[in-house]
Image: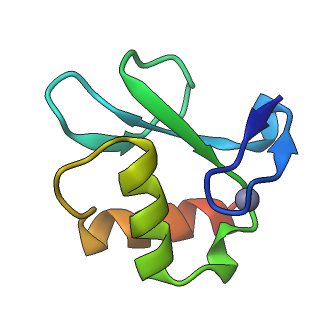
């Protein structure tokens, strides 16, 4: 089980989306859940969270120095809604 960084729910890994900070400090959705780097998980309920909250939580979980791009948050929301 893994913990969703947004709501704190614990769920099986396959029900979560992994987000990873890669070695060159870019942040991406890790579709295959296998990319190396610091990762965190979000559940499919994440669309009910404000973009600013999504940014804050993921930023903290991945220990990022800068905010997520609006584009990334948008892409993540689209990805979640497609599940
Ligand atoms: Zn969640």
Q: Position of residue 15 (x, y in %)?
A: 80, 42
Nearer to us in this view, 11 or 28: 11
Nearer to us in this view, 61 or 29: 61
For residue 67, side relative to residue 82 (left or right): left
Q: Position of residue 35 (x, y in %)?
A: 42, 19
Question: What residue appears at the point 39 percent right and 15 percent down from the top-left corner?
Answer: 36
Q: Position of residue 71 (x, y in %)?
A: 28, 70
> Image quadrant of residue 14?
top right
Q: Against 67, is 24 above or below?
A: above
For residue 48, side relative to residue 69 (left or right): right
Quarter of the figure that contains the C terminus: bottom right
> Image quadrant of residue 72?
bottom left
Question: What residue appears at the point 17 percent right and 51 percent down from the top-left corner?
Answer: 65
Total residue callouts? 0
Q: Against 35, is 56 above or below?
A: below
Q: Against 6, is 42 above or below?
A: above
Question: What residue appears at the point 44 percent right and 54 percent down from the top-left corner?
Answer: 58
Quarter of the figure that contains the N terminus: top right
For residue 62, side relative to residue 1 (left or right): left
Q: How is the image coloured?
A: rainbow
> Image quadrant of residue 59?
bottom left
Q: Against 56, is 11 above or below?
A: above
Ligand 1, what quadrant? Answer: bottom right
For residue 26, side relative to residue 28 (left or right): left
């Amino acid at each position: 089980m893994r913990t969703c960084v947004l709501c704190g729910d614990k769920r099986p890994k396959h029900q979560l989306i992994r987000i990873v900070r890669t070695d060159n400090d870019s942040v991406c959705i890790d579709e295959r859940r296998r990319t190396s780097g610091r990762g965190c998980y979000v559940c499919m309920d994440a669309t009910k969270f404000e973009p600013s909250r999504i940014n804050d939580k993921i930023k903290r979980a991945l220990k990022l120095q800068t905010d997520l791009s609006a584009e990334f948050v948008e892409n993540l929301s689209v990805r979640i809604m497609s599940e």
